[in-house]
């Protein structure tokens, strides 16, 4: 009887550990487009789905790449697809989705993936990017969901949420676990004449316990703090050679497996 009792405790302990390790079931929101071609009206809505978050317990946030958009077509407005490229290659590297071509030259592979992202953004928006007009965050969310579905045979979807400024440190700490990711929507300030430049997407890399934020943009890592200046929120970089960025919003992504 004693052995049976010990065995039952052991089994109960294993079950408890398994239950604690299992991802919790929750509801996720997938962005979809509502288009009215009669008046060219475009809006977005959420489809709520039940599922479990994709797990990643490795400390690999710094492995998020910082590709330089000048290396890709139409670089003037290439920030959003470059941020998507950073995130998708990170997903590939750590096993969330398989790479598209395991034998391709890395530089050629990234270019082909960028072009594929760009093509999907064009199809979603009904128009191509130009030097003066980029991709909307709604369409980036739709395309990220499409790519995850394609690479996972429909087993993985993308939860997406867009927040307006001011962004709280807690919002960024919430993006640190597992395969959560996103980008800050910012407006850079020129160091030459102080003018405000075009709206830009900077990949979120990490935030530390002291609330220092690391972003990936223009092929570099920007490290700094979020600060309020009057009614505006700014990212103030530590490196004086880096641009100050007015923070306009945050686009966040959470991969999940629907039930």
Image: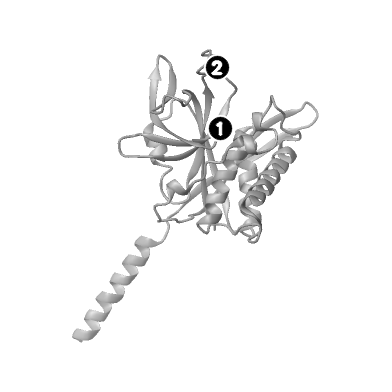
Residue 8, by quadrant, is bottom left
Up-down: is 143 above or below 164? below
Residue 210, by quadrant, is top left
Up-down: is 248 above or below 222? above
Q: Which residue ends up furthest to the right in the rendered image?
A: 38
Q: Can you tell which mark lies on residue 196?
A: 2
Q: Is residue 50 visible?
A: no
Residue for point 58% across, 37% down: 68
**Residue 216 in the figure: left or right of residue 138:** left
In the picture of the structure, the residue carrying the numbered disc 1 is: 201
Residue for point 43% across, 42% down: 175
Q: Residues within 10 Å of mark 1 (few under 14, many from 20)?
A: many
Q: Position of residue 169 (x, y in %)?
A: 37, 33
Label 2: state its secondary structure: loop
Q: Is residue 142 visible?
A: yes
The CA distance from mark 2 to mark 1 is: 14 Å
Q: Residues within 10 Å of mark 2 (few under 14, many from 20)?
A: some
Q: Position of residue 253 (x, y in %)?
A: 52, 43
Identify the image quadrant of the C terminus. bottom right
Up-down: is 106 above or below 221? below
Residue 208, by quadrant, is top left
Residue for point 47% across, 46% down: 180
């Amino acid at each position: 009887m004693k052995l049976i009792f010990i065995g039952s405790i052991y089994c109960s302990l294993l079950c408890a550990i398994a239950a604690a390790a299992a991802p919790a079931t929750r509801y996720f929101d997938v962005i979809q487009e509502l288009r009215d071609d009669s008046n060219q009206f475009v809006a977005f809505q959420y489809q709520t789905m039940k599922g479990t978050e994709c797990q990643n317990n490795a400390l690999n946030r710094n492995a998020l790449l910082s590709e330089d958009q000048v290396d890709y077509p139409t670089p003037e407005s290439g920030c959003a697809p470059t941020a998507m490229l950073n995130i998708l290659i990170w997903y590939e590297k750590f096993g969330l989705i398989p790479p598209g071509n395991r034998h391709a030259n890395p530089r050629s592979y990234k270019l082909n993936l960028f072009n594929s992202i760009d093509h999907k953004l064009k199809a979603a928006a009904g128009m191509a990017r130009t030097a003066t007009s980029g991709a909307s965050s709604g369409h980036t969310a739709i395309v990220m969901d499409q790519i995850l579905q394609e690479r996972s045979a429909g087993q993985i979807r993308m939860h997406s949420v867009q927040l307006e400024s001011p962004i709280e440190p807690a919002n960024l700490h919430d993006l640190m676990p597992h395969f959560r990711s996103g980008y800050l929507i910012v407006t850079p300030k020129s160091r030459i004449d102080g003018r405000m430049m075009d709206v830009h997407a900077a990949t979120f890399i990490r935030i530390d316990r002291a609330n220092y934020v690391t972003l990936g943009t223009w092929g570099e890592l920007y490290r700094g703090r979020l600060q309020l200046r009057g009614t505006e929120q700014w990212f103030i970089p530590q490196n004086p050679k880096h641009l100050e960025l007015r923070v306009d919003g945050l686009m966040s992504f959470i991969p999940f497996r629907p039930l």
